[in-house]
Amino acid sequence: MRSILKFICVFWLLISTIFSVQAQTPKPIKTRILFLLDASGSMYARMESDSRINVAKRLLNKTIDSLVGTKNLEIALRVYGHTSPPNVRNCKDTRLEVPFRPNNFTEVKKRLQSINPKGTTLIAQSLLQSAYDFPKEPYTRNVIILITDGIEECQGDPCAVSEALQSQGIILKPFIIGIGSTEDFRKAFDCVGRYYDANTEQGFEDALNIVVSQALNNTTAQVNLLDVFSKPTETNVNMSFYDMNSGQLMYNYMHTINERGNPDTVQLDPVYRYRMVVHTLPPVVKENIDVTPGKHTIIGVDAPQGQLMVKVDGLTNYSGLQFLVRQKNSNKTINVQDANTKEKYLVGKYEIEVLCLPRMVREVSIDQSYTTTLQLPQPGKLIVNCQLQDYYADIYQMIRNELVWVCKLPVEKRSHQLIMQPGDYKIIYRSKGDSRSSHTFERLIKITSGQATNVLLN
């Protein structure tokens, strides 16, 4: 019977472990690519050996063939300017011809062959309608590849639409392949997405290959955390990468220096532009980081650091003594640190507030690869006993004949034990039931390191 119970326990432990591992395995991210094709009348113009539309169809077919069998990928086709005659400026002439679904590659190719250019160029409206083409699902990367030979002709604002869709996290930054473009043409699309020239058939094919590679593959990057000598020696800190447009957190990497003494390589999706937060104390932020597909990108960040410690002399009665750390001339607390421990901070000036009695405020300087130590004297102990039934009592520190408030003694207690810094103090008190201010009493006390001082209030 005991062996059967043991078998059951081991069995359930194994099952729970399997499910735990499965639960921790991240769900693969699906990529959805929407090909947005310009079929306005100008696409009949010549491009070397054939018309622009025929070159676009041929190269898109070749690209789609290369995508067959790619895991976690779906494609769709939207076309604009192809249903209304040339003499009608139809600024709503955009249509999703083939929606997203698995293994629809043949369907997209077949529909492409029947597309014939006719009307006008309506990029803003097509981008806006594209937002509804992508199924609303988590763990997806929504990519638009716009192929066009013209700029907006319907008074829309492609830049504003693109920015809105990116900021809402609906799409990633679009790719634009511009056919027969000029300098003004390129400038018009700078704010819409990542632009690529396609003035020749070979240039068109190269641009498609680059764009699809970016849409599907990660690339490598290296983050150099630089010290005051501009050397990449800082490490062992988390780095968070956010999408600059939507603000979505994309990656967390704990910075590492490998066995060769170089910052380790990390994987980043080149589709995004990043805001990176290096979680030093205080954090360092770098914005508008672009990574080049297929190229190792080096990202340099100034993050020189030193260490800080508050140390207490000798044996101490402090229990869990902590101190607040703020940058100089700032009221924002960046850390609460335990005494007798070391912590790294960026090089610079800081103000620390030690939560002892009385509180102690000091300015310190953090220097590269150096431990700044603030030495506190060993505290003493103040023991206060009160014979009064009810009372008001406060402790003040004597500093050059000035009284500086330290703390109030709780009236609920008749006995108090306080761990205090060495120095001269006064206890000023009065019976709660006494109606005369003249019946205020004082006790002058001296706290000595490592010693107990007893006071009786009566």
Image: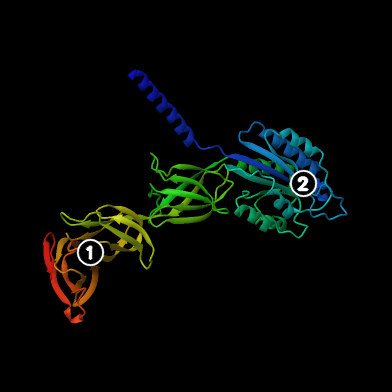
Dot in front, 1 or 2 = 1
C-alpha distance separating marks 1 and 2: 77 Å
Tell me the residue at 66%/38% (across/down).
74
Above or below residue 366? Residue 434 is: below
Above or below residue 108? Residue 372 is: below
Near-viewer residue (80 or 209): 80
Give the left or right position of residue 271, taking residue 329 as reference.
right
Q: Which mark is residue 95?
A: 2
Near-viewer residue (369 or 418): 418
Tell me the residue at 36%/22% (across/down).
5
Circle 1 sits on which residue?
A: 412
- Identify the amino acid type marked 2: Arg
- Identify the amino acid type marked 1: Glu
Q: Quarter-wise, where is residue 141 in the image?
A: top right
Which image quarter holds the C terminus?
bottom left
> How far across and how far down the image is residue 396, in percent?
21, 71
Q: Is residue 48 in view? A: no
